[in-house]
Amino acid sequence: MIIFAIMKLSLKHIVILVIIALTVIFTYQAYWLIGLYGTMQSKIKSDIKETVRLSDYDEIFHRIEILRKEKDRKHGQMNISVEVNAKDHSTTVKNKSQLKDHTENNNYVTSTEISDLDLSTMLRNPKGIMQFEIYMQQGIHSGLDLMKNINVRYFNKLLNRRLDSLGINTPRRLLYIHYYKKDGEKKVLPKTLASFGESNYEYTDTVKLSIDPDKSYSYVLLLPPTTTVVLRQMSGILATSFIILIVLMFVFWYLIHTIMKQKTLDEMKSDFTNNMTHELKTPIAVAYAANDVLLNFNGTNDTEKTKKYLSITQEQLKRLSGLVEQILYMSMERRKTMSLKIEDVDVLGVIQHLIAQQKLKADKPVDITIDIQKSLTVKADFSHFSNIISNLLDNAVKYSKEKAVILITANRCDDFIEIDITDHGIGIEQDKQKYIFDKFYRVPHGNVQNVKGYGLGLYYVKSMMDKFNGSIDVESEPSKGTTFKLRFNG
């Protein structure tokens, strides 16, 4: 139903509808891909931050394991406590470290506090929980770093391994920085304590992790844009989307092509129906008039007149029979119920008989020359073979100018038999030749509009040659003539 409704629209409106549909689909697809890109880029950045934190966490426990293995050495102790004020729900994280100085056998006590945290609010969402974990991690750092120095090289090794597992194989640079103030100055100055990675590279993204409560020590990870990483991760989705868009464009193109073909066929059918109705009425009217003369005006008393009118009637009935035969063939061919009687057909005998008929019924001088091997036969249905040759001869005569000059040749080649019918008529333009075997198609000739036809003759010839497992080709030049080549299997 939709196709029939679309077929009623003009080509302009169909194209506009298709363009609008494709634009909407492409716009939605682009909007969806852009949104997905933004989501994946945010996730990549979040994963990188978490990777830095987890690598620092693993480095902490790596040092703790080393301290545990040093059984003969006492390093001191570290206590971390969380105090919650019930009145204002504020929270204080305290880190208290008691260290041993083995050289002087003295004890040192350090204490770090992180106050003014609303723990009840913080622990209600994932970001808050992660922030609380960072606070606790910083508290561990403040004590552990006094007992054993940070192993930045080991941290860098862990970080690289985790980044590689995320598919982030781009160049990167890691800095371990100490932020301090000079005496009497308020400005904070950075001092790079350690660095790893390529320095001569343009980095745009920065990930920073402060590892102590005072934020005086930080890891800084420098990365190029994450666009390449995100696009690589989206490669499967992008390829699938591209294929879908290509398929959609092909489907819409094929739909328009089919609709236009159906519209053209529908128009050609309408023209055929109108022309055929007119052509069927003409021989009936002529035969009826001839019989009316014989019956009502004593035409039978005049032998010459009787013969004349009977000839007219017979000619019109033959014409009517030919029209009915073509219509019947179309119906049978469509239903696939046609039965063929394949036999050896004498080429020379059939063509000589058809030439004689053609000269009798032609309305212009006809000069037909034949060059056919004797005893040459083809395997075909006798009736349809005759109709094929007759159709081609009719066309050769119809599309010749004042006089029809035709050459018919037939020869046996290696494994086939070829029959050529050549005229010196008006010819067919190169761009029209590929359509001449289509149903209802008629070559537009501006100067030969009076030639009768329905666009069925060459379609019939091509269809029958296919059923004979043969082929038909055409060679033509405008104003020089046309040659149809029939090839039958030997």
Image: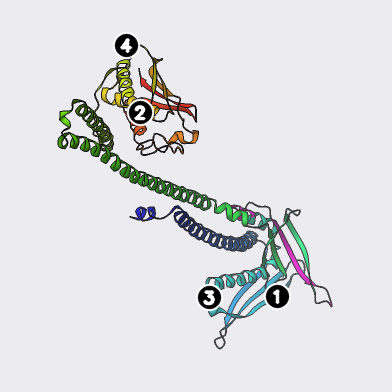
Q: Left or right of 341: which side holds 474?
A: right
Viewer-nearest of discs 4 and 1: 4
The residue that appears at 40% across and 20% down in the rendered structure is 367
- What amino acid type is highlighted by mark number 4? Ser
Image coordinates for residue 484, horizontal then vertical, percent: 41, 25
The front one of 396 and 237 is 396
Can you see residue 97? yes
Q: Which residues are magenta?
A: 160-185
Q: Using the image, tell me which numbered label, if any, was put on residue 363.
A: 2
| Residue furthest to the right | 184
**As drawn, 8 above or below 104:** above
Q: CA distance from mark 2 to mark 4?
A: 32 Å
Q: CA distance from mark 4 to mark 1?
A: 125 Å
Q: Secondary structure at mark 3?
A: loop
Q: Left or right of 407: which side holds 361?
A: left
The front one of 106 and 296 is 296
**As drawn, 107 above or below 468:** below
Q: Which residue is mark 4?
A: 375
The residue that appears at 26% across and 38% down in the rendered structure is 331
Viewer-nearest of discs 2 and 3: 2
Q: Using the image, tell me which numbered label, if any, was put on residue 109.
A: 1
- Say which quadrant the N terminus sits in: bottom left
Q: Which residue is mark 3?
A: 123
